[in-house]
């Protein structure tokens, strides 16, 4: 499913969607609907960034799971991760040994695992945001939460919970 042909088709689909959104924005501008036009332009920019991500993933060897996880990330985070891969090529990472296709292939597996790591971080971050939101809702009803007990229940450190709750 995540082969290069699929990625190319998805990129093309996203480019088509971007064009449709830009056309919608132009129509909305003509009708004087500024907010609607701005929303259409934002959707077009998002579709364009998504297409760029699909195009950047084309011709990369990483296993499908790494690609899928990368596509699940926030677009900015996904592009930043690919930028890190591109800015630190195999020639720079593999320093003291004669480079071999096998070593470079294994390095690409490491890149796929880095996608898994980033995806896991995004999932954890989303989970803790939701926990903090629920704690805030409970406390807004006048019920006090014992953070130490919540930490034991969730497996999230007390320090992390306190820090996130302070900034919410």
Image (spheres, grey):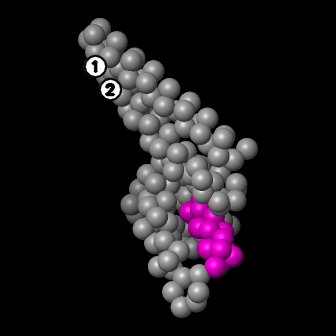
Please state the horizontal and vertical placement of residue 77, each as a whole percent of the image. 47, 56
| Mark drawn on residue 86 | none
The residue at which mark 2 appears reads as 38
Please state the horizontal and vertical placement of residue 146, each as a whole percent of the image. 57, 66
Q: Quadrant of residue 84?
A: bottom left
For the C terminus, give its image quadrant: bottom left
| Residue at 40% over, 17% down | 24
Please state the horizontal and vertical placement of residue 119, each as a whole percent of the image. 60, 59
Q: Nearer the viewer, residue 103 or 113?
A: 103
State yes or no: discs 2 and 1 in contact (Cβ < 8 Å).
yes
Q: Classify 33 as above or below 159.
A: above
Q: Residue furthest bottom?
A: 96
Q: Residue furthest top?
A: 31
Q: Is 4 within the magenta? A: no
Badge 2, how many Cα within 10 Å: few under 14, some, many 20+?
some
Q: Classify 7 as above or below 57.
A: above
| Mark drawn on residue 34 | 1
Please give the range of residues in magenta: 100-119
| Residue at 42% over, 68% down | 87
User: Is residue 70 shown left or right of residue 91?
Assistant: right
SS class, disc 1: helix
For the N terminus, give its image quadrant: top right
């Amino acid at each position: 499913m995540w082969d290069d042909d699929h990625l190319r088709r998805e990129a093309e689909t996203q480019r088509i969607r971007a064009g449709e959104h830009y056309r919608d924005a132009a129509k909305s501008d003509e009708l004087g609907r500024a907010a609607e036009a701005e929303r259409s332009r934002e959707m077009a920019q998002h579709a364009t960034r998504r297409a760029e991500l699909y195009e950047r993933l084309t011709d990369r060897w990483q296993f499908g799971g790494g690609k899928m996880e990368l596509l699940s990330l926030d677009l900015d985070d996904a592009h930043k991760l690919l930028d890190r891969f591109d800015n630190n090529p195999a020639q720079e990472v593999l320093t003291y040994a004669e480079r071999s296709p096998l070593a470079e292939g294994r390095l690409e597996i490491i890149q796929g695992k880095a996608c898994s790591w980033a995806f896991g971080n995004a999932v954890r971050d989303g989970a803790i945001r939701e926990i903090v939101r629920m704690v805030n809702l409970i406390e807004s009803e006048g019920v006090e939460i014992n953070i130490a007990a919540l930490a034991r229940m969730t497996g999230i450190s007390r320090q992390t919970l306190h820090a996130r709750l302070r900034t919410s």
